[in-house]
């Protein structure tokens, strides 16, 4: 059975005012999505299913955060119960990315291969450094003595990203396996 996959797009960090509004910090490159969302799926921690689904009554920006008003959340005490909850959307509701761009969840789990055909291992994490992302690879046995290989995501190193084919093609730089 195909399991529905949920992706975090925001987090409830506090209440706002005394009418039950919540303050949300977006965890998405598309915070504008909150202005058109009809409902929120709220999760506690690592729960696999939503703790609750709420209709969205309104959304506005305030000091770098978003203030959301949810239907039937009309007091500070009701809004307080939602603090620290994660807002997630099903994968099929993600905003489309431009060609050549990928979500991190699409990269993790892919096999890393060199342009010469060597299998390096599996990508286990993507570090966002600011300058460029870095792929963390758990190396296959015998590839290196390192516990992990760090690959900078720059055009002359990461040649192709092929999620549908299950791999990333890498031009290995001198010294990366030492």
Image (tube, rainbow, N blue to C red):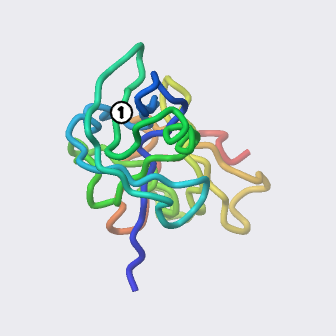
Residue projecting furthest to the bottom: 1
Looking at the figure, which quarter contains the N terminus? Answer: bottom left
The residue positioned farthest toward the right in the image shown: 145
Q: Residue at x 35, y 60 (%)?
A: 90
Side of 84 relative to 103 (left or right): right
Using the image as rendered, state which of residue 68 and residue 117 is in the foreground. Answer: 68
Q: Position of residue 105 (x, y in %)?
A: 45, 55
- Seen in the picture, residue 30 relative to 40 is either above or below; the reply is above
Residue located 27% across and 45% down the image = 100
Q: Which sits in the foreground, 87 or 102?
A: 87
Front residue of this view, candidates 88 and 170: 88
Counting from the top left corner in percent of width and height, residue 2 is at 38, 80
Q: Crowdedness of circle 1 by 10 Å Cα count: few (<14), some, many (20+)?
A: many
Q: How many marks?
A: 1
Q: Is residue 119 left or right of residue 27?
A: right
Q: Along the horizontal axis of the image, is 15 left or right of 7? A: right
Q: Residue at x 29, y 24 (%)?
A: 60
What residue do we see at 42% from left, 23% from top?
65
Is 27 in front, or is 44? Answer: 44
- Badge 1 marks a residue whose secondary structure is strand
Q: Is residue 47 above or below residue 70?
A: below
- The C terminus, quarter of image: top right
> What percent of the width, then of the height, locates residue 58?
26, 34
| Residue 7 % position (x, y) | 43, 54
Query: What residue would you read off at disc 1?
Result: 68
């Amino acid at each position: 059975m195909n399991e529905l996959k949920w992706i975090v797009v925001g987090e409830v960090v506090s209440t706002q005012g005394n009418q039950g509004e919540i303050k949300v910090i977006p965890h998405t490159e598309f915070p504008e999505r909150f202005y058109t969302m009809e409902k929120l799926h709220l999760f506690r921690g690592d729960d696999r299913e939503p703790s609750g689904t709420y209709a969205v009554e309104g959304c506005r920006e305030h000091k770098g955060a978003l203030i959301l008003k949810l239907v039937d959340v009309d007091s500070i005490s009701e809004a307080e119960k939602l603090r620290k909850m994660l807002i997630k959307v099903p994968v099929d509701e993600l905003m489309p990315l431009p060609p050549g761009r990928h979500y991190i969840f699409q990269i993790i789990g892919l096999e890393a291969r060199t342009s010469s055909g060597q299998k390096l291992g599996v990508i286990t994490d993507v570090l966002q450094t600011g300058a460029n992302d870095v792929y963390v690879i758990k190396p296959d046995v015998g590839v290196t003595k390192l516990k992990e290989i760090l690959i900078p995501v720059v055009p002359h190193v990461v040649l192709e990203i092929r999620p549908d084919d299950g791999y990333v093609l890498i031009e290995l730089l001198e010294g990366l396996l030492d």
